[in-house]
Image (spheres, rainbow, N blue to C red):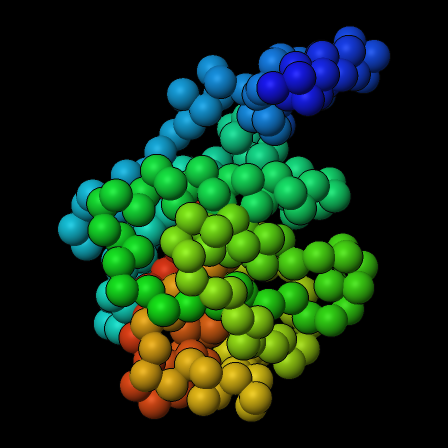
């Protein structure tokens, strides 16, 4: 107990000298708040996809790739304060925020049964040039947080065969075409995936082009069942 009190005191002292900031609104965090303040967590724009039959995320894959379930934790809008959470995880050197958000998402959504039956988690990969530049794969960090709550392993089973250019200004069809053949299952993990229910994990879904390409690579392995999870989802146009 003494250690906890000293630790709390040190954290409070450090917050005075170098205040920690909420990733969403930028206000100073206090006490036991981590990464995102209580107010922003309470107002998080949850999708509630886990409670909606044939939700917006699942509609993006209808008739394309068979998936059991597709869920996201909160909505992504480019100019929303909550977009900063994704930017901090992906671009601002905060991989532990990804782990923390993955844990929170799994804890909030698992009671719905949306993760029931999942055998392992597979993160969407980065091409090795991007991985070397960033130093970590944000999707793997999010998957690690989810896995901690679900008690299932994370398997780095996919590889990006070549780097892709930015998809920001491309149409949905152009994005799908640009991702065709980009991803493949690592040969050493083919047997690991066979016959398993796999949860494919990414940071955000917009058109679904990246997830679609990864899903097709996984579904080429015999006997696989596939579900999808992203931390955030853009609104379906």
x and y, in percent, of residue 53 in the image: 16, 51
Which residue extends farthest front?
Answer: 2
Above or below: residue 37 compared with residue 119 = above
Q: Is residue 34 visible?
A: yes
x and y, in percent, of residue 88 in the image: 66, 38
Q: Which residue shows up at 46% across the image and 55% down it?
A: 147
Above or below: residue 20 compared with residue 194 = above
For this view, does 8 lie left or right of residue 44?
right
Q: Which residue shows up at 32% across the image and 83% down it?
A: 195
Q: Is residue 173 visible?
A: no
Q: Which residue shows up at 74% across the image and 43% down it?
A: 93
Quadrant in the picture for the N terminus: top right
Which residue extends farthest left?
Answer: 53
For this view, does 113 lie left or right of residue 138?
left
x and y, in percent, of residue 46 in the image: 35, 34
Location of residue 120 (image quadrant): bottom left
Q: Which residue shows up at 72% across the image and 16% down it?
A: 6
Location of residue 9 (image quadrant): top right
Residue 212 vs residue 118, the one in the foreground: 118
């Amino acid at each position: 107990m003494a250690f906890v009190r000293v630790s709390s005191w040190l954290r409070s002292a450090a917050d005075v000298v170098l205040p920690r900031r909420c990733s969403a609104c930028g206000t100073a965090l206090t006490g036991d708040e981590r990464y995102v303040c209580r107010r922003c967590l309470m107002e998080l724009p949850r999708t509630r996809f886990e409670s909606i039959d044939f939700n917006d995320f699942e509609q993006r894959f209808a008739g394309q790739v068979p998936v059991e379930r597709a869920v996201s934790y909160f909505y992504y809008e480019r100019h929303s304060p909550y977009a900063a959470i994704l930017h901090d995880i992906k671009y601002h050197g905060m991989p532990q925020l990804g782990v923390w958000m993955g844990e929170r998402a799994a804890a909030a959504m698992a009671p719905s049964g949306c993760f029931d039956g999942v055998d392992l988690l597979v993160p969407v990969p980065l091409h090795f040039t991007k991985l070397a530049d960033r130093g970590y794969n944000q999707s793997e960090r999010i998957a690690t947080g989810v896995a901690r709550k679900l008690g299932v392993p994370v398997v780095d089973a996919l590889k990006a065969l070549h780097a892709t250019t930015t998809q920001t200004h491309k149409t949905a069809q152009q994005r799908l075409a640009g991702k065709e053949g980009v991803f493949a299952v690592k040969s050493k993990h083919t047997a690991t995936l066979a016959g398993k229910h796999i949860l494919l994990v990414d940071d955000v879904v917009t058109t679904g082009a990246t997830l679609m390409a990864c899903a097709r690579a996984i579904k080429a392995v015999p006997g696989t069942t596939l579900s999808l999870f992203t931390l955030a989802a853009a609104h379906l146009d």
